[in-house]
Image (cartoon, rainbow, N blue to C red):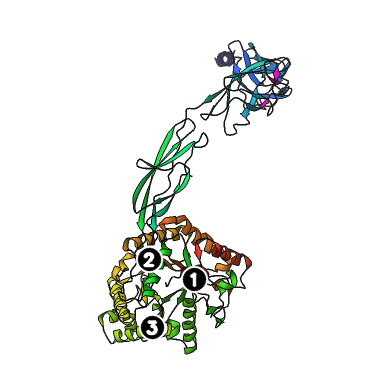
Amino acid sequence: MRYFGCVMVIVLLFFSFSCKKEEAKSSLAIIEEFAIEELPDIEFAITAENKIEATVLDGTSLSSLTAVFTISQGAKAYVGMQVQGSGYTKKDFSDEVVYRIVAEDGTTNEYTVIIYTDIVIKSYSIVELPNTIFSIDENNITATVLYGSDLSVLTAKFTVSEESELFIGDVKQVSEETTNDFTNPLSYKLQSANKEKSYTVTITEADNVLPVADAGEDKTYYIPQGSSSALVSLDATGSSDVEGEIAAYEWNNGSETLATIKTAEVALSEGEYTITLTVTDAAGATASDEVVINVLMSGSYVPIDENATQETKNLLSNLGNIANSDQFIFGQEFPLSFKLNALSYDLTTSDCKDVTGDHPGVYGIDPHYMLYKSDTEKQLHIDEAKEAYQNGAVVTFDFHQQSRTDNKIYMSEITWETDKTLLYDIVNNNNGARIWFYEELDAIIDIINNDLGFPVVWRLYHEMGGGWFWWGSEATYHSSDLYINFYQLAVDYIKEKSDLVLFAWSPNYPLDESYYPGDAYVDIVGVDIYEPTKATLKSSLVDLSSFALEHNKIAVLAETGYRNDYINTKPEFWNDNVLDAIKEGSDDIRIAWVLAWFNAPWTSSQSDLYIPNSDSPQNAKDEFILFKNDQLTLFQEDVKELNIYD
């Protein structure tokens, strides 16, 4: 029984192994995928006839290429008697290569790899049409050009397959030399030793694109006093036509033709005009744009002090003429008396004149240095103001008044509560504050009336929106209404005592109209702004000019400068930030003057200057000379010729 059991086990094992061996054999002998490692962009097609085909450019090296393929599982690939490995066996594919695929069960299948070569135009463009892109698709080369393009004599620039040449008929074409007429489709023959291929070049002319009319931005012009019209500039330089030059321009005010050229100047009387610009292109197509021109009479500026002297009235009126022109006066605080290291008692010169050859046309004078300094310094600044007047320049006062008890200007240095409430106490006549205030004003009025005897622009209690001065936003009980009452109180008192004062109101940037004291208390409006970018200054002055126009006042840039080492870090400030901002603002900016802060006598560093002096680097001086020589800026000699007090 034991012997019989062993025999049965052996027989069963034999039949089991025999079945498994027969099931593992496969008859599949197929190439599923084929590629060439060195030609990654070439796609191979496997046909039903077992051909594996691809086309490459003529001149492509085929002598040593690596086939990458996928075949049936368990099968092997042969070329001749040599086994082929995917991704590492190199072959010469210059001629047909036959792969024999042998399946596991010995079944065979053959594939023929054929790589064809082709001659082509590789790139194509036209020299005279550098921005035109040509598409090459099979045997067609196409492009679209602007309407009106001249296609009659053009020069093709091209590259072709190696050892091939391009012909039109029997005429060989030379890239960048041979010219042809492309008005109609053009036929090429590309030829090599044993191949020929045809190409057709078709250049399509696009539909006409309408021209673009640009009449410019809306503008406001002012009629000079004594004239009945303003000279208005019409400018169509922003107009364009993608296909070429504009053929004709026409400016019309209703049915009236004003001009038929691109830029023109026309005289217009007071009124608002909607002027239509019509442009015509070479194909006769037209486009139009409108510009609104507002022509106003120059402001009839009358001082708020009805008893103002004739010279004071003349000064205001002439400042208005300057503001409404395309020029402005350059000014500086203490231009003659303040220099680095010390006061200057030589009133024949200034840092400005040392660099540019002329003094500023506006002199800023602070009565602080008359009331709280020595009699000698007081007289220096009086003489400086007189020097300005005698040379036809403008004198403007700004008063950095000390507080009553602490004798401080800045809130950060004030300790007495009564000084912190000083603004409130003056307005409400508390604790003798108003009497003290009037006495301080009397001292300045006495200088104006008796020491000077000519008009000044008094910029009262400026930068009220900031928290640094005792009359500013950090004052106890501060409000815009409280400040307005304070400002009006000062104006009413000064008007009673002097007929030589024009009153200026200049908040710090940004312009806060809530502090405006009212038209009956202001002759001139300004803004104080330091380190402005060109964009910020332009926007600020446009807003200020608009505010001034609305209230029939004269606008000024009351204080400006660059405090962060202007000489070494921003020497181009006066040109790039200030002058360019005003130029870009064009007619939307109407200001009488721009005033730079002083070069302080208690410092010795070039980094503390607001304009260059004789010791400054040459590039800073050159920049400031450019500013002075610009046709928009007026300095003392320019202002003197205007006779602003007459």
Q: Helix, strand, or loop for circle 2? A: strand
Give the Cα separation between the discs numbered 1 and 2: 20 Å
Give the Cα separation between the discs numbered 3 and 2: 24 Å
Q: Are marks 3 and 2 in contact (CB under 8 Å)?
A: no
Local crowd at mark 2 within 10 Å, few (<14), some, or many (≥20)? many
- Residue type pointed to by label 1: Lys
User: Can I make out residue 268 in this image?
Assistant: yes
Disc on res. 520: none
Between 390 and 527, the one lying in front of the other is 390
Q: Is residue 423 left or right of residue 137?
A: left
Disc on res. 640: 1
Q: Position of residue 289 (x, y in %)?
A: 40, 41
Q: Quadrant of residue 431?
A: bottom left
Q: Is residue 40 above or below residue 277?
A: above
Q: Position of residue 606 (x, y in %)?
A: 58, 73
Residue on which the image places disc 2: 554
Between 27 and 621, the one lying in front of the other is 621
Local crowd at mark 1 within 10 Å, few (<14), some, or many (≥20)? some
Q: Helix, strand, or loop for circle 1? A: helix
Residue sticking out furthest to the bottom = 375
The magenta span reads 157-173
Mark sitting earlier along the chain (3/1): 3
Q: Are marks 1 and 2 in contact (CB under 8 Å)?
A: no
Tell me which residue sits at (62%, 29%) in the image. Answer: 126
Mark sitting earlier along the chain (3/2): 3
Please name which of the two marks, 3 or 2, marks the residue nearer to the observer. 3
Give the Cα separation between the discs numbered 3 and 1: 23 Å
Residue on which the image places disc 3: 449
